[in-house]
Image: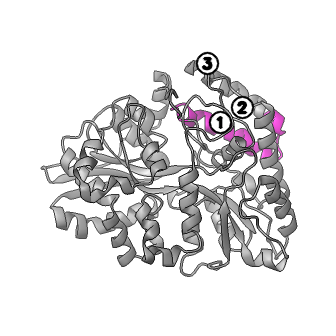
Amino acid sequence: MPLLPLQQRRFGGSNGIRVRVGASAALMALLAGCSGAGGTSSSGGDTLNVLMVNNPQMVELQKLTADNFTKETGIKVNFTVLPENDVRDKITQDFSNQAGQYDVATISNFEVPFYAKNGWLHPLDEYSAKDKAFDQGDILKPLQESLTAEDGKLYGEPFYGESSFLMYRKDVFAAKNLTMPAKPTWQQVADLAAKVDGAQENMKGICLRGLPGWGEVIAPLTTVVNTMGGTWFTKDWQAQLTSPEFTKATQFYVDLVRNHGQAGAPQSGYAECLNNMTQGNSAMWYDATAGAGSLEAKGSPVKGKIGYVPAPVDKTESSGWLYTWAWGMQKASTKTESAWKFISWASSKEYENLVGEQIGWANVPAGKRASTYANPDYLKDAAAFAEVTKEAIATANPRDPGTQPRPTVGIQFVDIPEFTDLGTKVSQEISAAIAGKKSVAEALKTSQALAEKVGKEQQ
């Protein structure tokens, strides 16, 4: 995974799908490099230890907790806040050992299936059912499903959710007499990228991630693979990285970013593309819906100049990804009632309103509740992108994101522990192809061998 500061990054089955837990070696790989530094031990029943990722919205929550949550409940919260790579390692270490050092931690829809399978998480259904004020039914269905494991139990409550969409400069398109389709295909996007390339000084047609990392270049690329008919694995775990569909999608992506993409594409991730779009160096950007808040923030040079349309497609009706940072409760925690009070507050409508009133509505951790998209205060600040974001999340289908059956859930990732290593190694090959150091065919040949090994371990 990339080593950029998280505040500048995003990574962001049908019945019978098997969520496979990898071999012990794979789980040990997840633990490799774990840091021993971290939180303070709990003391007393009114103290919780929370381990979380250091993105800006989490840092805001940390600042708001004492004067609001603690003041209302009497529960003190000790936070340990770490960059994404570090926090994933530390959470896996603590939860896999059921050490109980942390009561609550930020987990994503990537971790939930195998964390739950291993018995590392406490089910949350019983708490949400009793807590009527929390309003579980208000949580957007795709996020609720993505945090529900094979056993049908809910293991996480979302802090925010995101999908992906295409962002473009309305003023640049107007000046060139170009029209962005309401639901573009990838070929239309490529054609438009050629026409707006150079429309303004230092402006390229599109920005696409090329930075190595299973959560960087692999995330958008895999959505292109899905909609063009490809898949990482067949339903019975046969690797497909050299299939015609996977090859076509990867060649398309590499050619598009090489021909009309940003300078330094092999080193460009979410942060770099966000900066390029903000500074007027890209006419289009395909990435996380979370990026819109920064583009439309007060002081943004491009505020009001951006249009937003669904993720481009080819053979599928939709192709946006699905990601959420959520709150998980460690099974070993002895403070489950207090832990739920924190989780329910941090995922609540009340908390969203608190952020909107004290920090600003553009900063609200949105993308998780239907009610957010009926809130006039939020819609006033997020009018440009709110509806398309909501629709992108609603149409995301992690159980069936492509044109053929999958062995496990996931849109922009394959939901097995081994994918953190596999995806990262494959991303290095793809990034090398974007850099022109090797052909797509060479990159995928090497990647296929890596995927075949993982596929055999899953069979």
Q: Which residues are magenta?
A: 415-443
Residue 74 visible within the image: yes
Give the structural element (helix, strand or loop) at label 3: helix
Q: Label 1 to label 2, Cα distance in Å?
A: 8 Å
Residue located 40% across and 50% down the image: 326
Amino acid, disc 1: Lys
Q: Is residue 211 above or below residue 154?
A: below
Q: Earlier in the sequence, mark 3 or mark 2?
A: 2
- Give the labeled residue for mark 1: 425
Amino acid, disc 3: Lys
Q: Main secondary structure of the magenta part?
A: helix
Q: Is residue 250 left or right of residue 343?
A: right
Q: Earlier in the sequence, mark 3 or mark 1?
A: 1
- Give the labeled residue for mark 3: 456
In the rendered image, which quarter contains the N terminus? top right
* Crowding at mark 1 (Cα within 10 Å: few <14, some 14-19, many 20+): some
- Give the labeled residue for mark 2: 447
Residue 35 visible within the image: no
- Image coordinates of residue 29 in percent, x first then y, are 50, 30
Q: Earlier in the sequence, mark 1 or mark 2?
A: 1
* Crowding at mark 2 (Cα within 10 Å: few <14, some 14-19, many 20+): many
